[in-house]
């Protein structure tokens, strides 16, 4: 068979290589317009502005005063250019972990704070994000919501390296903030606590140490706990008033408790959902 057709493909392949190199260079080095938005999403190697972000005030977050104080202090230090820690917020679902991050972004956006939301599947590109924000006068929070890893996920090691371990240190204008329902971010098994060789693992304790090492690289741990009944009702009352349905507690208390029972939880998210349902039915 003649080699002429293959030879004819060479110019096309070279052209495709040049296009790919140009696209890679543009994606890697073109900085977004950080004034286009306050929050951004990392998608496929690009920072996309979020023009309609979820805005919430710190005053709307009840029952978590200690957690608010800790994260507010750390964020103020970071925005002011002083030393601050990467943050891991863990604990009961619906208690305000992600809302607290959004509220502090809203408070400090005018001070130059920007947020880049990164999905777990995109965490392997964290080094590219670090390069993208380097040298900017803005302050950046890289935000990972509901973070948890399965065994051997590539983003797990990328996050470990950026937090503490890579030879290339992130700039002092970048902070990582993650929320999770798992304290150690990785699945743990009961037989890992047994003094036995399992699954061919010769040093099982070292495997356990590997799993907890990621969460230990966050300098600040903030724990959230389930609300008691009084806290839940206070939050429901707050959201009812915010929605213009400032009714006496005697008129809705029983419904609010039954709503929480049907959802299997008493937390801020459930309280807000009840308030929207109740106010909507009341017109």
Image (cartoon, grey):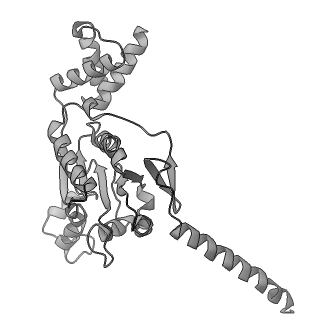
Q: Quadrant of the C terminus?
A: top left
Task: Work out whether residue 111 or residue 250 is closer to the camera in this orientation and state it.
Answer: 111
Please tell me in which quadrant of the rendered image residue 68 appears: top left
Residue 256 x %, y %: 28, 17
Q: Residue at x 24, y 24 (%)?
A: 235
In the rendered structure, the answer to whether residue 243 lies left or right of residue 207 reads right
Q: Position of residue 252 (x, y in %)?
A: 28, 11
The quadrant of the picture occupied by the N terminus is bottom right
User: Could you tell whether 221 is left or right of 278 in the image?
Assistant: left
Q: Position of residue 124 (x, y in %)?
A: 42, 66
Vertically, is 211 above or below 227?
Answer: below
- Picture quarter containing residue 280? top left
Number of disc labels = 0
Task: Residue 153 in the image: state x and y as whole percent.
Answer: 39, 65
Residue 241, relative to residue 200: is it above or below? above
Residue situated in front as seen by the camera: 235 or 252: 235
């Amino acid at each position: 068979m003649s080699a002429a057709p293959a030879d004819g493909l060479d110019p096309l392949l070279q052209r495709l290589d040049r296009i790919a190199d140009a696209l890679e260079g543009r994606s890697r080095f073109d900085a977004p317009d950080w004034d286009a938005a306050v929050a951004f999403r990392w998608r496929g190697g690009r920072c996309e502005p979020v023009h309609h972000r979820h805005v919430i005030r710190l005053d709307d977050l009840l029952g978590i005063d200690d957690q608010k104080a800790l994260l507010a202090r750390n964020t103020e230090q970071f925005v002011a250019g002083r030393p601050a820690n990467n943050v891991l917020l863990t604990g009961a679902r619906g208690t305000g972990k992600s809302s607290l991050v959004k509220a502090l972004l809203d408070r400090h956006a005018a001070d130059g704070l920007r947020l880049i939301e990164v999905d777990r599947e995109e965490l392997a590109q964290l080094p590219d994000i670090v390069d993208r924000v380097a040298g900017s006068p803005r302050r950046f929070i890289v935000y990972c919501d509901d973070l948890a890893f399965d065994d051997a996920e590539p983003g797990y090691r990328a996050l470990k390296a950026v937090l503490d371990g890579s030879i290339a240190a992130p700039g002092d204008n970048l902070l990582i903030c993650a929320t999770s329902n798992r304290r150690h971010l990785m699945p743990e098994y009961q037989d890992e606590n047994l003094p036995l060789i399992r699954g061919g693992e010769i040093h099982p304790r070292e495997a356990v140490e590997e799993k907890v090492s990621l969460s230990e690289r966050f300098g600040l741990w903030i724990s959230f706990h389930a609300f008691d009944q009084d806290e839940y009702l206070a939050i429901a009352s707050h959201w009812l008033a915010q929605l213009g349905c400032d009714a006496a507690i005697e008129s809705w208390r029983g419904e609010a408790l039954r709503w929480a029972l049907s959802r299997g939880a008493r937390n801020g998210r459930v309280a807000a959902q009840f308030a929207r349902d109740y106010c909507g039915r009341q017109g």
